[in-house]
Structures are given as structure tokens and as C-alpha cells.
Amino acid sequence: MDRQDVYVALRTQINQFESEFISKKVDKEPFEPSRVKFKRCYDCIIALYIPSDVKTNENRSVYGDRNFAKFRGEKAWCICILNTNNGGLFERYQHIFYSFNANYFVPILYVANAFVVPDGFDRNVHTICGRGIHYFNHWIAAYFYDCFCYRPKSVEFSEDGQVRAFYEYNYRIGQPSAHEIEERLTSIIQEAEKKYSAIENQDKSL
């Protein structure tokens, strides 16, 4: 799937989740779009919802863009598990988390329309790659995470949300300027939203 198709699929599932939000009893507070998060698990992107009473480390210091920085939560509701190869939806997905710092493996099972709870939550907010459900605030960060070498045109982010480089067909195009970063990311977002709007308008006309 290209990134526009990934965005369309995610938006469709999130919209459906929002329409069923009250009946699912995910949170005591009303649906809040900013609580929708995204996680990359190999060939999947998982859309998550962080309820208002869940502890996270989003108050940690971030030197880059918070949209693209990595965060953690003590639990999350799994909205959907999207296969980015063919657009299919998994009912469940077994992810193996490996901590380089602590040198341990932890299997975490994600099940669509259910809460996912890790084996623990590191309460030190400044620990980036610690126990907890890892996620990004923006789907673009999840789309490009840990797989930039497989994309014809890619973006490499640091864990603090800074753009390290752009890639084209595995060729690294140096350190981009602030203007280039804004221009390229804005273009990606606009292309995806344009495709979603076109499909949505087509559906309404049927």
C-alpha cells in the first residue's frame, strides 16, 4: 500500500470507531481526536486510543516535533490492526518487543476492539524505550518507522521527532533544511487528505 492508501484505511477505521465510541465504553470522557495514536509493528500499523485516565510519558522533554516523537502508555485501546502490504485488517497480532537497554524480549498481543496492556510501565517519563505501549501521535511517523529502507521515498525520524534525513530508493539525501522538512511533510499530508476526501465524496454521491 502507498501512504495515501494507508491514510485512507486508517481514517475509515477511526471514523467508524468514533461513531461507536460511546457504546464501546472506552473512556469516561467524550471522544477526543488527539487521543488517537499510531504504532508500527513490522508490516502493520496499529491505530490506538489512549483514554483520559491512562498514564503516559507525553510530558517528557522533546527537542524535535511532538507529532513524530515516540511515547509510551500504560495501556491503550486497539482500534484496528492494518496490514500495510495488502490493506487487510488483522483481528489480532503478536508483537515481540525487544529492549536493547535492558536486553529482554516481551511478547505483546494486540487484539482489535480491546485493551492492550503491557507487562509493566516505566514511570520514569524520560525513558523513551522502556516498558509500556509505544506509539506516535502522527500516522506518518508510524508509517516510516523502522522501514525507511523499504520505501521508494522515505523519511527517517529520531525518537525525539526530529527529521534525520530523506531517502529516495535507499539513497540518503543528507540532512534536510527546516524548509525542506516542512515542505515535504506538508506535501505528504495534503496528498493523503486529498485522496481521502475524494473517496469520501464519491461514497456520498452513490
Image (cartoon, rainbow, N blue to C red):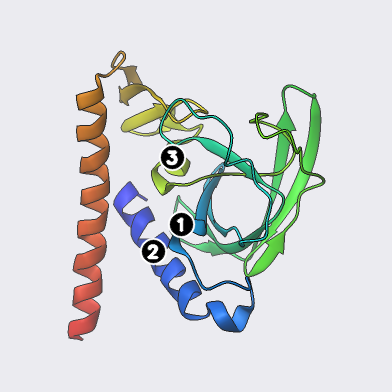
What residue appears at the point 68 percent right and 68 percent down from the top-left corner? Answer: 114
How would you rate the neighbour count of disc 3 (Cα within 10 Å): few for under 14, some for 14-19, many for 20 or more? many
Q: Position of residue 151 (x, y in %)?
A: 37, 34
Q: Secondary structure at mark 2?
A: helix
**Left or right of 12, for residue 55:** right
Instruction: Please report contact status of discs 3 and 2: CB closer than 8 Å, yes or no.
Output: no
**Left or right of 45, for residue 149:** left
Instruction: Please report contact status of discs 1 and 2: CB closer than 8 Å, yes or no.
Output: no
Examine the rendered structure and indicate whether residue 27 appears above or below residue 134: below
Q: Secondary structure at mark 3?
A: helix
Instruction: Kindly tell me whether residue 66 is visible in this rendering.
Output: yes
What residue appears at the point 21 percent right and 26 percent down from the top-left corner? Answer: 180
Q: Which residue is mark 1?
A: 34
| Earlier-in-chain disc, 3 versus 2 | 2
Q: Quadrant of residue 49?
A: bottom right
Q: Amino acid at mark 3?
A: Ala
Q: Which residue is mark 3?
A: 141
**Left or right of 79, for residue 127:** right
| Earlier-in-chain disc, 3 versus 1 | 1
Q: Amino acid at mark 1?
A: Ser
Q: Which numbered dot is residue 6?
A: none
Circle 3 or circle 1, nearest the eye: 1
Q: Position of residue 77 (x, y in %)?
A: 63, 63
Spatial separation of the CA atoms under disc 1 and disc 2: 13 Å
What residue appears at the point 61 percent right and 61 percent down from the top-left corner? Answer: 52
What residue appears at the point 68 percent right and 29 percent down from the top-left corner? Answer: 127
Q: Which residue is mark 2?
A: 11
**Left or right of 153, for residue 93:** right
The C terminus - image quarter: bottom left
